[in-house]
């Protein structure tokens, strides 16, 4: 990762966090307390929306989650802004009127009615790729066309980890980053998705998990987003309080090196630009 000579101010907030209501390690209250300890001005909970075709990672008690985050908003009102978000899978729409914001993500490829997880483990990814006969371009076309159709229809507030199919690209063979046809395809879909006006998430989750050295989306996609002046938001997709504020300064410097001069954050109930 390149570090900038310029001093950058990282935003003290994170809106992509998972708690014990789904596959996270900490309770929502522990996350809010850790955010306070980190000096955050705001924190958002974004549990995985219910996916009936795969119950391993999603929230089963969505009502309990809504009640608990609503309680925390009230309890910590004078200290920090707490937001009730959700990470909706593109294959499993939620009632977004219940939430302050929606992160729209695609975690599966559907082949002949079967849902293949893309990013939950490297073995899952390889099984998913095998469903496309090992052809990364076919997988990428299916993934991006499904995702961009969802983005156009549902217009989530935030587009989660846009090119997550590349999450494991540094694990053994660089299938995607060495393939110029793939890069052109991803850039074409990034242009299409940017027309939605939605905020693109820059997700450092695969970095703290040790899979990648740079966040998602890949740098070529980030350059496209910069050229289009598409709004971006930085998050760590944290699943424990240890990664709530993961390398925020370093990630912000990386974005500044690419040319970004502002990121989005939630403040007083609205997404606003803040300079970096
Ligand atoms: Zn996700
Ligand atoms: Zn997530």
Image (tube, rainbow, N blue to C red):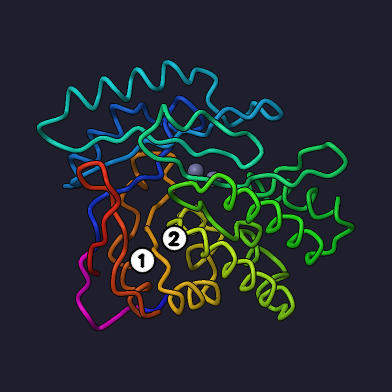
User: Circle 2 — which element?
Assistant: strand
Where, quadrant-wise, is the C terminus in this rendering? Answer: bottom left
In the foreground, 225 or 68: 225
Q: Which mark is residue 202?
A: 2
Query: Range of the magenta residues?
Result: 3-9
Where, quadrant-wise, is the N terminus in this rendering? Answer: bottom left
- Residue at 34 percent across and 44 percent down: it is 242
- Residue at 58 percent across and 27 percent down: it is 50
Which residue is denoted by mark 1 in the rendering?
251
The span from disc 1 to disc 2 (Cα, nearest Å) is 9 Å
Mark 1 C-beta closer than 8 Å to ligand 2:
no
Where residue 108 sits in the image (x, y, percent)? 69, 44
User: Circle 1 — which element?
Assistant: helix
Q: Mainly helix, strand or loop, the magenta region?
A: loop
Where residue 164 sits in the image (x, y, percent)? 60, 56
Q: Is residue 242 left or right of residue 130?
A: left
In the foreground, 68 or 95: 95
Find out whether the residues at labels 1 and 2 contact each other: C-beta distance under 8 Å.
yes
Q: Is residue 138 left or right of residue 118?
A: right
Farthest residue toward the left?
Answer: 78
């Amino acid at each position: 990762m390149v570090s900038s000579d310029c001093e950058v101010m990282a935003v003290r907030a994170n809106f992509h966090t998972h708690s014990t209501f789904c596959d996270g390690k900490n309770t929502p209250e522990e996350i809010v307390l850790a955010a306070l300890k980190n000096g955050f001005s705001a924190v958002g909970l974004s549990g995985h929306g219910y996916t009936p075709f795969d119950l391993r990672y999603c929230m089963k008690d969505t009502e309990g989650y809504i009640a608990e985050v609503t309680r925390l908003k009230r309890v910590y009102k004078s200290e920090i802004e707490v937001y009730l978000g959700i990470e909706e899978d593109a294959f499993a729409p939620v009632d977004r009127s219940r939430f302050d914001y929606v992160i729209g993500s695609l975690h599966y490829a559907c082949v002949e009615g079967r849902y293949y997880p893309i990013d939950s483990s490297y073995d899952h990814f390889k099984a998913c790729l095998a469903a496309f006969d090992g052809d990364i371009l076919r997988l990428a076309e299916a993934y991006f066309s499904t995702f961009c159709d969802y983005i156009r229809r549902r217009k989530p507030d935030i587009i989660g980890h846009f090119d997550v199919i590349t999450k494991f690209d540094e694990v053994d063979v660089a299938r995607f980053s060495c393939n110029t046809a793939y890069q052109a395809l991803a850039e074409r879909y990034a242009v299409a998705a940017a027309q939605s006006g939605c905020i693109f998430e820059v997700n450092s989750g695969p970095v703290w998990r040790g899979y990648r050295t740079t966040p998602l989306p890949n740098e070529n996609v980030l350059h496209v987003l910069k050229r289009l002046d598409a709004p971006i938001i930085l998050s760590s997709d944290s699943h424990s309080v240890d990664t709530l504020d993961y390398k925020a300064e370093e990630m912000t410097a990386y974005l500044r090196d690419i040319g970004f001069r502002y990121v989005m954050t939630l403040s007083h109930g609205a997404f606003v630009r803040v300079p970096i």
